[in-house]
Image (tube, rainbow, N blue to C red):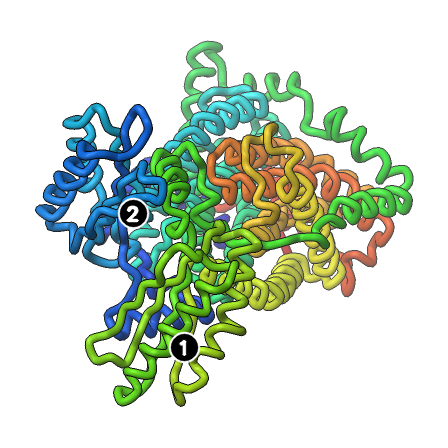
Amino acid sequence: MSQLPVRIARWSARHARTAIAGWFAFVVLCLAAGAAVGTNEATGVDYRVGEAGRAEALAAGAGLERRPVEHVVLRTAAGGPAGEAAAAAAREITERMRALPEVAEVAAPVRSEDGEVLRVSVVLRGPELAARKNVGPLLARTAEVRAAHPELVVEETGSPSISKGVNEQRGADLALSERITLPVTLVTLLLVFGSVVTACVPLLLALSSIAAALGLSMVASHLAPDAGVGTNMILLIGLAVGVDYTLFHLEREREERERAGGRLGPEALVELAAATAGRAVVVSGLAVIVSTATLYVASDVIFSSLATGTILVVAVAVASSLTVLPALLVTIGRRAERRAERRAGRPSGRRAARRSARRPAAGTGRLVGALLRPARRRPALTLALSGLLMLGLAAPALGLRLVDPGKDTFSRDIPAMQVHDRLTAAFPGLLTRHEVVVRADAGRSGQVRQALADLGRRARADALFATDTEPVLRTSADGRTGVLELSVPFPASSTGAIASLDRLRHVHLPAALGPVAGAESAVSGDVARGRDYVAHERRTLPLVVGLLLLATFLMTLWAFRSPALGLIGVVLNLLSAGASLGLLVVVFQGTWAEGLLGFDSLGAIASRVPLFLFVILFGLSMDYQVFVVSRIQEAVRDGMPAREAVLTGIGRSARVVTSAAVVMVTVFGAFVALHLTEMKQMGFCLAAAVLLDAVVVRLMLLPSVLLLLGDRAWWPSRPNPGPNPGPNPGEDPGRSPNPGPGSGPAHALG
């Protein structure tokens, strides 16, 4: 593996046109394959977790699964009782809906308690999750009736239309994030490279990697169903790592060009860059892939979808930096040489040499030098203070509360959510429902019905349940299975709804089913789904984090052959993830930042966020870890003393790490502008973690630890200086392929 990046870069440089054409053909092929097979979306079966999942399986086995329902709400525009005009419009709605092939049945109109609102409930055909694709014709019929009755307010809401609205909002949000991140990323790259052409290369490769990964994700969905979040991760992670990997490579190629002073051609330069930065990119990519793969252990369709999207886009980004990037750099370099020759009328090498001599050598900037100064002068004190800072930031994470964000947490900018609020205000019994599923032998069907009826009476006598709404009982054709729907007058995420679930599961249900011997029962519904999902996350979090720590240690050990560096990587990543999670709790678990960041606090953190963040942050932190430590290792192999090697390596990598951090913070920070609170939390935490990692960890903690350890950091053996590799085959013997320290293939990762 150690020589593979060099061999690929050499071939790509010598066959530039073929490599470029081959890459874009690969991207087109991936997109075509994805379009041909389509996306295999996850079904309700894939989301089943805990007791709620068991209840849904029992109901589905008896043909009593939850059905997608839309509600058409009618009221007078001027207010007051819904009279004959509303009744006539309700009859028209009923006729129009029944004529649609997407509709299974339409219930009779129901009047609210105050008589001001009429409700027509429409049951759609097909599974619950697929209904958002079929709700369009229903919304169109509602719009037709609204236009025909201007004196009425005719609105529609329900899980299908809300889901459709959420998807549309998510698409608009992603488009907004792209409009923010692409210009900022381009400006950052222009500041780094000072060339429009060179600055566009990372963006081009990142966007093409995203396109290829999107196509591959469609194909992969037929092996692991897509939960609808994989695309978000491909866009979120793809732009960040795609630009970063290319940036690492470009920066190293430029260093080698400046060091060579015009003595080497473009082919030799990209080969030297591949011998160092190329290997660092491979190790970084593998680290992200291995870290992300631990999400599969969670046995959750959403995390599996996140993992698949992330792994695919990282793998493609690594491939692009190894294959097409050298070809693009050689092509750009050759054109630059030809332009220089035409302008000067002299060999381009001499002109490039004088230009390189006038250009300042890459080194530590003033800001980085100032941040690095405390570690250089007083490493022990810097380690103690920066460590205490990170621990202090992580402390609020001890008060972390988790919640599964349900329907009531969606943005009220979605029209269907506004109608939902008005609907539940008029019909409180529709706010939250529990679904009790009971199955027994065929001979006990009468007992099952009697027990469920008794359960309904118990619930209506309990203040935690809706006392003004009749329980709804459905039974299977064979009478063995019954489903009882109980209404709760509280939002699904509220303490009242959670208390009603606990009362139902542990008090009312056991008491009602006592006489039915051998009956199997379980409770589902919006509250049960959320609670069981949070419990599932709490059970899997320690296992995934344990595997993540082990994977981080082993990857660092494999890359640098140093147990000390492996332990340092684990501890630093834990500090970075813990500090960012603590900041997340401070900002999003309270209410003080609601107006600043535009969100409604859940009083908790979305249950999927901590596990996802730990995994992704560990992977991204390994990017910086590998790149910075590899530069230090090169200096050590050049024969530098340990102290000088640490300062030199960090100085050499400072500019590219800072630039990469700016890109990542911009990409992740843009997600704070999205509507979904869960995505806001993810974007904020990722941006905070990258910023802390690039500044505090890489410029204070890491150098302090390595300066204090000295040669012991490389135990069991200090890296030895590598021999001069000599000219590359086929290269001009008069040109030295190793014009300066740290530039040859001998300075690769261990």
What residue is shown at x 66% (from left), y 37% (from top)? Answer: 691
Q: Nearer the viewer, residue 247 or 540?
A: 540
Q: Nearer the viewer, residue 246 or 324?
A: 246
Residue 250 is at least partly visible in this image: no
What residue is shown at x 50% (from left), y 20% (from top)? Answer: 195
What residue is shown at x 84% (from left), y 45% (from top)? Answer: 643
Residue 126 image point, x, y percent: 21, 57
**First of labels 1, 2 by sequence position:** 2
Q: What is the quadrant of residue 701 in the picture?
A: top right
Q: Nearer the viewer, residue 289 or 522?
A: 522
User: Residue type at mark 1?
Assistant: Ser
Residue found farthest to the left: 99
Category of crowding for the residue at label 2, using alpha-carbon neighbours closer than 10 angstroms: few (below 14), some (14–19), many (at least 20) = many
Q: Nearer the viewer, residue 478 or 85?
A: 85
Asked if 679 appears above or below 490 in the picture, the reply is above
Q: Which residue is mark 1?
A: 521
Callout 2: SS:
helix
Residue 78 image point, x, y percent: 31, 24
Residue 556 image point, x, y percent: 65, 58
**Which label number is shown at residue 88?**
none
Q: What is the quadrant of residue 364 in the picture?
A: top right
Q: CA distance from mark 1 to mark 2?
A: 28 Å
User: Residue type at mark 2?
Assistant: Pro
Asked if 452 appears above or below 301 in the picture, the reply is below
Category of crowding for the residue at label 1, using alpha-carbon neighbours closer than 10 angstroms: few (below 14), some (14–19), many (at least 20) = many
**Which label number is shown at residue 160?**
2
What residue is shown at x 41% (from left), y 32% (from top)? Answer: 413
Quarter of the image for the C terminus: give it: bottom right
Residue 482 is at least partly visible in this image: yes
Q: How many marks?
A: 2
